[in-house]
């Protein structure tokens, strides 16, 4: 006990690993940060949260030396002031930033990437053998199974993330910033990353963790600080962190304003907009049947790999089905390809807006109008640019897309505004059925709230909405009814009823229960028994 007391006293006397005091930053007339202060301790995971535009990235760029703060602000590392606007000194003082967009050279080896820009020299030559030896030692600490000689181009996203961490560790970094590190990782890769973070923490490294994902903050953070509109709002200790408090701090309003106000109970008398019968493919989806009614938000939940996205792609005609029908308003419209679905009022919002959805180097107006370009053509097939612009401006106003103009490239927008541009494109097709796959992935909490309100509004206008999400709170908050999938089949339905709201526990019980056999799998076993 005396030894513990001595350590505690010594720890209390030691300066924090990082202290940022009164940091402000202006860009012309725009004030991005206003007097922000932040403290991070050695061996601590400190989450930094806030909406897009709250100032998180600007603050981290000041920490890394990419920006200089306005006069009056200071950055201290272990109690010693850091020179402003000097990335080389920041690295030398043990600061490393792992950005959401990884900064690796894919055609170089792991070892070459780990020491890129900091090559080990022996005289006039690069000491590749020593770089390989040091990289192998770091990779061994991380517990990875790829070689220092492996080409980065051949690694998975999760493994590339670990190469970035290896680079920070090889440079003896004591403060590591991770900016949305799990955005493109599988669940297995996320688990591995969390193990690595725990190991870094035990080594006394201070980790600043930026994420929009509440569950990650709950799992990792020892403390959480919130920025809003460039101002420091406050910090919460681990025991104080809750979704309600974080959301209130981030957006300045209560969590109760987030989701639907009035959930609809199942009503078979309502008009049936979409019906799916016995939909199957060759690998992942087994005999799925369901219906969606006018004005209903149907949630589809399940663990990663349960077949949710695969089912949506079959309904949309993006992937070939081996059996099944799709009916809209009672008419068989089973699509062979996406254009068939579009012609019959079914649209699909992909889970990967940057790769499969948007044209990031094209203007907002072109992204919104690309599917209805023919409607903006004059005689002779010449495009009417004024009509395209007016269409986009109306969509921007309707969906409250934050942009200085529709000529701006979509890649310059925040994640939430990019998602609203993609939704605007789909709504230009005047759909009857919306298939939304992870509609709030990678967007901040304020944009999530706006997307929820939009979904609620569209349902109120009579559209049938199918919403796939990995975030149980939004499924519970938005859906009138929830289908639960496991092993490629629908294993049950959870509905709202009198004094019986949908709960996360009810969904997870179906998603994980070994006692509930998926319909498709049960049918396969029956067929196998009959054959025997």
Image: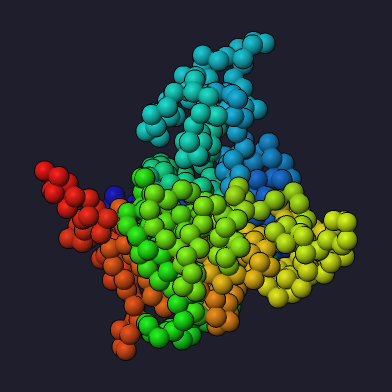
**Above/below status of 394 relative to 44:** below
The quadrant of the picture occupied by the C terminus is: top left
Residue extending furthest toward the front: 331
For the point 44% across and 73% down, the residue is 292
Q: In which quarter of the image is the N terminus?
A: bottom left
Q: Residue 509's quadrant in the figure?
A: bottom left
Task: Residue at the far bottom: name it.
Answer: 498
Q: Nearer the viewer, residue 63 or 214?
A: 214
State the residue in front, 98 or 337: 337
Q: Which residue is drawn at 64% across and 61% down?
A: 422
In this figure, which colouring scheme has been used for the structure? rainbow
Give above or below for 164 relative to 378.
above
* Total marks placed: 0
- Regarding residue 124, the answer to whether it shows in the image is yes
Q: Where is residue 18? Give x, y as percent.
A: 56, 51
Q: Is residue 249 left or right of residue 518?
A: right
Nearer to us in this view, 441 or 494: 494
Can residue 79 be seen here? The reply is: no
User: Is 114 situated above or below 132?
Assistant: below
The residue closer to the viewer here, 28 or 527, is 527
**Residue 200 relative to residue 529: left or right:** right
At x 59% / y 40%, what residue is drawn?
102
User: Could you tell me residue 142's position as x and y percent?
Assistant: 40, 35
Extreme-left residue of the structure: 532
Q: Where is residue 322 in the image (x, y as percent from the top left)?
A: 39, 49
| Residue drawn at (36%, 45%) of the image | 283
């Amino acid at each position: 006990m005396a030894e513990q007391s001595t350590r505690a006293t010594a720890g209390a006397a030691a300066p924090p690993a990082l202290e940022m005091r009164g940091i402000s930053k202006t860009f012309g007339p725009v004030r991005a940060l206003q007097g922000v202060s932040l403290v991070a301790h050695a061996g601590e995971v400190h989450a930094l949260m806030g909406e897009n535009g709250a100032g998180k990235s600007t603050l981290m760029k000041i920490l890394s030396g990419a920006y200089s703060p306005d006069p009056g602000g200071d950055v201290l590392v272990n109690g010693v002031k850091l020179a402003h606007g000097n990335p080389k000194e920041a690295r030398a003082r043990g600061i490393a930033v792992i950005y959401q967009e990884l900064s690796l050279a894919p055609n170089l080896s792991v070892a070459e990437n780990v020491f890129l820009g900091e090559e080990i020299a022996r005289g006039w030559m690069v000491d590749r053998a020593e770089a390989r030896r040091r990289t192998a030692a770091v990779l061994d600490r991380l517990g990875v199974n790829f070689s220092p000689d492996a080409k980065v181009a051949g690694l998975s996203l999760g493994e590339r993330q670990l190469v970035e961490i290896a680079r920070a560790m090889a440079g003896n970094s004591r403060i590591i910033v991770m900016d949305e590190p799990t955005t493109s990782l599988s669940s297995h890769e996320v688990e591995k990353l969390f193990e690595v973070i725990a190991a870094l923490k035990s080594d006394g490294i201070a980790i600043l963790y930026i994420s929009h994902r509440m569950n990650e903050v709950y799992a990792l953070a020892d403390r959480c600080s919130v920025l809003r509109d460039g101002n420091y709002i406050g910090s919460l200790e681990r025991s104080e962190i809750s979704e309600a408090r974080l959301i209130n701090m981030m957006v300045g309003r209560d969590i109760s304003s987030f989701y639907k106000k009035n959930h609809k109970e199942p009503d078979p008398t309502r008009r049936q907009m979409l019906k799916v019968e016995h939909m199957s493919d060759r690998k992942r989806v087994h005999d799925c049947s369901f219906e969606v009614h006018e004005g209903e938000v149907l949630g589809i939940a399940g663990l990663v790999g349960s077949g949710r996205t695969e089912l949506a792609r079959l309904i949309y005609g993006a992937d070939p089905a081996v059996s099944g029908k799709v009916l809209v308003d009672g008419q068989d419209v089973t699509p062979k390809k996406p254009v068939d679905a579009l012609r019959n009022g079914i649209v699909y919002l992909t889970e990967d807006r940057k790769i499969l959805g948007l044209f990031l180097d094209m203007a907002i107006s072109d992204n919104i109008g690309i599917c209805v370009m023919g409607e903006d053509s004059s005689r002779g097939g010449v495009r009417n640019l004024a009509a395209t612009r007016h269409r986009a401006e109306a969509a921007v106003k309707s969906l409250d897309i934050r942009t200085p103009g529709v000529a701006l490239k979509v890649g310059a927008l925040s994640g939430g505004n990019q998602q609203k541009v993609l939704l605007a494109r789909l709504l230009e097709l005047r759909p009857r059925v919306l298939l939304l796959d992870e509609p709030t992935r990678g967007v901040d909490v304020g944009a999530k709230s706006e997307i929820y309100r939009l979904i609620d509004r569209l349902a109120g206008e009579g559209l049938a909405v199918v919403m796939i999400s990995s975030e149980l709170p939004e499924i519970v908050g938005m859906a009138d009814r929830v289908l639960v999938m496991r092993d490629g089949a629908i294993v049950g339905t959870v509905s709202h009823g009198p004094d019986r709201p949908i709960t996360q526990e009810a969904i997870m019980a179906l998603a994980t229960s070994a006692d509930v056999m998926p319909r498709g799998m049960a049918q396969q076993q029956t067929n196998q028994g009959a054959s025997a």
